[in-house]
Amino acid sequence: MSTTTELLREAAALFPDEVVTQAHVRHLDLPGAGRFALITLDNGLDHTKPTTFGPASLAHLSAAIDQVEHEAANGEIVGVGITGKPFIFAVGADLKGVGLLKRREDALAIGHGGHEVFKRLSGLAVPTFAYYNGAAMGGGVEVGLHCAYRTVSAALPAFSLPEVFLGLVPGWGGCTLLPNLIGAEKAVKVVIENSLNQNRQLKGVQVFELGIADAIFEGADFLEQSLLWTAAVLKGEIAVERPEVDRGQAWDQAVATGRFLADGKVHGAAPAAYRALDIIAAAKDGDLQAGFDAEDEALADLIMSGELRSGLYAFDLVQRRAKRPAGAPDKSLARPVNKVGVVGAGLMASQLALLFVRRLEVPVVLTDIDQARVDKGVGYVHAEIDKLLAKGRVNQDKANRLKGLVSGVLDKAEGFADADFVIEAVFEEIGVKQQVFAEVEAVVPEGAILATNTSSLSVSEMASKLKHPERVVGFHFFNPVAVLPLLEIVRGEATDDASLATAFAVAKKLKKSAVLVKDAPAFVVNRILTRFMGEIQNVIDEGTPVAVAEKAVEPLGLPMSPLVLLELVGPAIGLHVSETLHGAFPERFTVSPNLKAVVEAGKRGFYVYDSGKPELDPEVAALLQQGDKVLTEEQVRDRVLDAVAEEISLMLAEGVVAEPQDIDLCLITGAGWPFHLGGITPYLDRAGVTERVTGKRFLAPGVASVPAA
């Protein structure tokens, strides 16, 4: 047994609950090439439980390499391959275990241990091959990078180095080997750009096109074809040629571009992207061991950081809590939904219709006040399906079927008489929505669910004049509907369990992260963002320059500045929500006269983009009426965060959601709150804001923060 194997088995005590990935060695006779050793990574569970690498798993892989190393040295085999169980190659380090580490030396040992095991693959006396047969992430990608050759399945659904997204760096060779394989520009795209864009995944074809894999084969017989290709390589019938990596100015430019991307996403507020870029920059000289050492040090530092704990906390929310919504009724109460009605045919309604028909694949009928609007809405859905067809996301038969399921009518009785679920997306005015629901209730079946996409109005009041208010439920999506995962499901005062269970069942089919929310003004995301934005508006109204107010919150690393976000939402919608909340809580929510002036002037936002960067619109500047109270950036930031902490505390006291974790989940999935902050409540706890405002923390000590050693 090698020393590396022994040390890893000792380190396994740090990960008591590790689900161990075994490394099984079997031998094959490759046609005309000779005896070949194939290592298969398998944790013994089904494909919904991906294989990961903790110390015990690395020890098993190291023991397998002990065996094939001996066989290679004795001339008993001609090559070694590594692959995964069906649908899964390997998805990286055991993140649950990483979160348990309390000492930097333990974190350093884990990083070093992974390197020592993976490096042994590249040091074997025979060629090595990685066969990416299924999902490969993090350490799963990296173990393959240590091999001499790689193949990838065309059916591979997810391939990434997501570490920066979580607050780490690709620390088992990713930052060093990948740029030396495919060049710095492509490596920065995988390591930095994709990670910071909500952990964007690569498909098998993209992996091949980037040059990470040397060959690509169809999924049905992927391993068989990979082994035949391997035999041809070993026999010299196939020579793998790779483009020469540009180690000149292009490398430096790629790193500079990466820093620009990181600045735009996290504004220097999280270190992981910058540490990764430092290692990529240094990898230009091709000194692999120096790169591995730098990865070890970066891993050790980052594993002990608050950003990683935040990232793991956020990851757990979206991977686990989002799939088991707190407070959701028994799913057995849900009624079947075989037809959907959409009231309205504007942009939001049309987006909803597209989502429902794609995910549920049932008839979807839109209605509106005139035929032109109905035709435009149906036309939008059909055009979007055609775009999916052009991109190869659906085939011609499915595109035809989906388009055939979408129709529009003027008469609700004609369109909704057999609908099981009807959602309205009309003008945000309580009287209009009450009238719409009264008309719908008169024509739908008795068990049909009536859902509202309202962003701030009372679901209970909306249902109050109906004969059956118990079947009305809030179903609040976030724009763009196809991108943002959050769905706030609102229980009105009369909503019954069957209606609520049906709403959650539909949300699951729509592949949305559903959070149960009490019927309170503006629910969760809009209430917090409106308080946040309201304080920014207040300090501007009082006299703080716009640029100072905007820059004050940059250290949070939010995806966009407050006034750019306002432009995305729409000033008129922002004004409407602030007016709604001012009516409910006048002592905390104000209506900015300057925002009102901007809306009345028909401006789409505060900025113009003549130079490509946001600059204050001169016409908006002329509208602003400001006082003489000028705050510093720090004063603005403290005031904004204090207001947000107060509002969250009040929302929890009101029971708007079950726990602080639900507020964090809402902001991460509905407002793009950065993973590296771990959600708003742990950030406020770490910054000391919560205790300053409320006298206590939102979360227990150690949750989303560095544990005591």
Image (cartoon, rainbow, N blue to C red):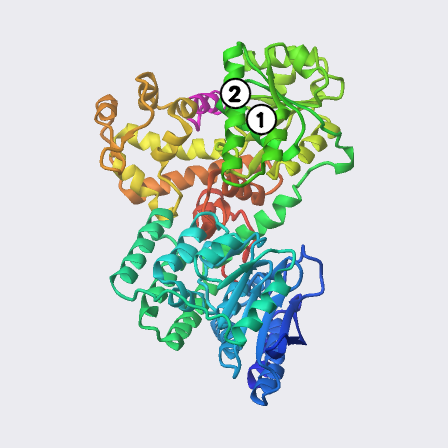
Q: For the residue labelled by badge 1, is the local secondary structure a helix, a strand or a loop?
A: helix
**Residue at 50% in and 78% down:** 116
| Residue 47 image offset from top left, x and y in percent | 68, 57
**Residue at 31% in and 19% down:** 597
Which of the 4 image quarters holds residue 244? Answer: bottom left
309 relative position to 603: left or right:
right
Looking at the image, is 509 positioned above or below residue 35?
above
Residue that sits furthest to the right in the current view: 332
- 339 or 329: nearer the viewer: 339
| Residue 320 image offset from top left, x and y in percent | 63, 49
Q: Is residue 626 inside the magenta stretch?
A: no
Q: For the residue labelled by badge 2, is the local secondary structure a helix, a strand or a loop?
A: helix
* Residues tagged 1 and 2 counted as in contact (Cβ below 8 A): yes
Magenta residues, start to end = 576-589
Residue hosting label 1: 353
- 590 or 58: nearer the viewer: 58
| Magenta segment main secondary structure | helix
- 603 or 587: nearer the viewer: 603
- 214 or 427: nearer the viewer: 214
Looking at the image, is 66 positioned above or below residue 85?
below
| Residue 461 image offset from top left, x and y in percent | 61, 17
Q: Is residue 478 something one can see in this rendering?
A: no
How much space separates mark 1 and mark 2, taking CA atoms?
Answer: 9 Å
Looking at the image, is 508 positioned above or below residue 308?
above
**Residue at 24% in and 62% down:** 249
Q: Amino acid at mark 2?
A: Gly
Residue hosting label 2: 377
Which of the 4 image quarters holds residue 548? Answer: top left
Instruction: Say few, some or many: other residues with alpha carbon within 10 Å of mark 2 (under 14 / 14 to 19 / 20 or more).
Output: many
